[in-house]
Image (cartoon, rainbow, N blue to C red):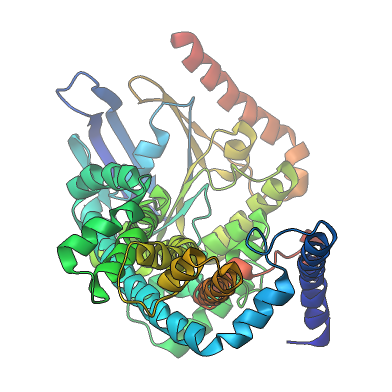
Amino acid sequence: MNLATLKSRALVLWPPLAIGVGILALWEGAVVLFKIQQFLLPKPSSIWAELLENWEVLRHASWETGKISLGGLAIGIVAGVTFAFFTTLFRFLNEGLTPLAVAVNATPIVALAPIFNAWFGVTGSVSNQLVVATVVFFPVFINTAKGLTEVHVNEIELMRSYAAGDWTILREVRIPNALPFFANALRVVAPLAVIAAIVAEYFGGPQDRVGYVITWNAGLARYDVAWAAIAVASAFGLSLFIGALLIERVSTPWKSAVQLEETTKK
Amino acid sequence: MSEKNAISINNADKIFNEGRDDEVVALSNINLDVKEGEFVSLIGPSGCGKSTMLRLIGDLLEPTQGSVEVFGKSAHQARIDQDYGMVFQHAGLFDWRRVAANIELPLELHGWSKSDRATRSQEMLDLVKLPDFGGYYPRQLSGGMQQRVSIARALSFEPKLLLMDEPFGALDEMTREHMQIELLRIWEETGTTVVFVTHSIPEAAFLSNRVVVLSPRPGQVHSVIDVDLGQRTESTRQDSDFFNAATEVREALRAVEEQE
């Protein structure tokens, strides 16, 4: 990476950063100026102070919640991709399952958390992990199946003109075609996994989890601690999102290739 | 041009959805021979079955009746033997493969070694006048450049037959005329047989040894027009011979329309 691209990245980054800092400053100023009660809206500075104060508890809780998010994410992705391949191999499955999956995906799956607790037990991680996996499954399945099946008819004809069979077409056309669709899904589900994990934890489970820390402290009117936990969870969700972006960049390099100008034609 | 047939279509019919309510007779009683090294265009109003006919030759569709022979064997065997290359209006390059890797795809499927592939793809890039673009991704190139890569890919394994389905249909007029000259140059250099589907009258008249005019519903051969413009250059487009050929094709197409 040369200096010019570094400079252009910095140029892209500074407006959102500046606005973010500005909003924090406004928030702080507004709370002081309008004497807003701490339990309604704590100052960013006191949230920061609580974050440092409770660092050990929060660090451990994010670790536990992180394991649930990532575990559920992994299960959901593997299941989603596997189902997508099956529907590509058997067309009737695609025609039957895909509309159903789209419909189920529009429902609030995370609301199933208490029921999952009843099914899989409230003491371990399995129940919450499966909530995350279910939330992750549908976007991954729908998008990947779309990428595997929505191939331009000329591209299939071309492969057949090379006497290529279905497996070769799958390997050379369908899978690479599905990669951007999969990467798209990953970008959606990575932060969604953290949201699902925390909401699932609201409904019970072990007490060393971010969701529990938030509800417990909110219950005791210690809103600044609850906010600190939310901040940590947000940071974790954001880093998963950035991870998904990086995977997208690396796995689909042709997407970020720059269009040549007509004038460079020789 | 040799006297041997590259393609021989005998009494071919193509019926889609046979026996159902939405049955369509796309082609009816087609007879056509194409000599080796010949450049033949298929032209006709939309729905006349010209693309279907191209797909029968390429064994991407099977005739309902009749037979299609390519280089003296069944169209199916010719496809398995990779006797033809195909170019579509949609360049159909794979986004995820760099330009050189796109050209090498048929070679890869054919089990060529890596170094042989690299040598050939560079030769092909030279042939289509894009020597320095092997390392780019297709979407970085303009439409005309992509179409040239698509032609390079179709020619990479030196097929004796090139099937082209409105390959220049999506290009602007200037690029299109430039590509026609390029295609004729490549055709002369390689001696390949070309079957070229188009709906442009001047394009058919300019490129072809013979223009096959099809009439629709059901698709049938209306007439076959011989064209002899000799060596073609940009100035050929101002020649009276070219005008006469284009007029002849145009009149045949008018007759087809009146027949409807």
Instruction: Please indicate, yes or no, whether residue B132 appears anywhere in the rendered image.
Output: no
Q: Position of residue B73 (x, y in %)?
A: 21, 55
Give residue A228's quadrant in the image.
Answer: bottom right
Depth check, front residue: B241 or B199: B199
Counting labels gives 0
Q: Quadrant of the C terminus of chain A?
A: bottom right
Q: Position of residue B7 (x, y in %)?
A: 32, 48
- Residue placed at 24% from the left, 30% from the top? B16
Q: Is residue B51 left or right of residue B171?
A: left
Q: Quadrant of the N terminus of chain A?
A: bottom right
Q: Position of residue B231 (x, y in %)?
A: 66, 51
Q: Is residue B243 above or below residue B89?
A: above
Q: Is residue A62 above or below residue A135?
A: below
- Residue placed at 54% from the left, 58% from the top? B187
Depth check, front residue: A131 or A102: A131
- Residue placed at 60% from the left, 87% from the top? A53
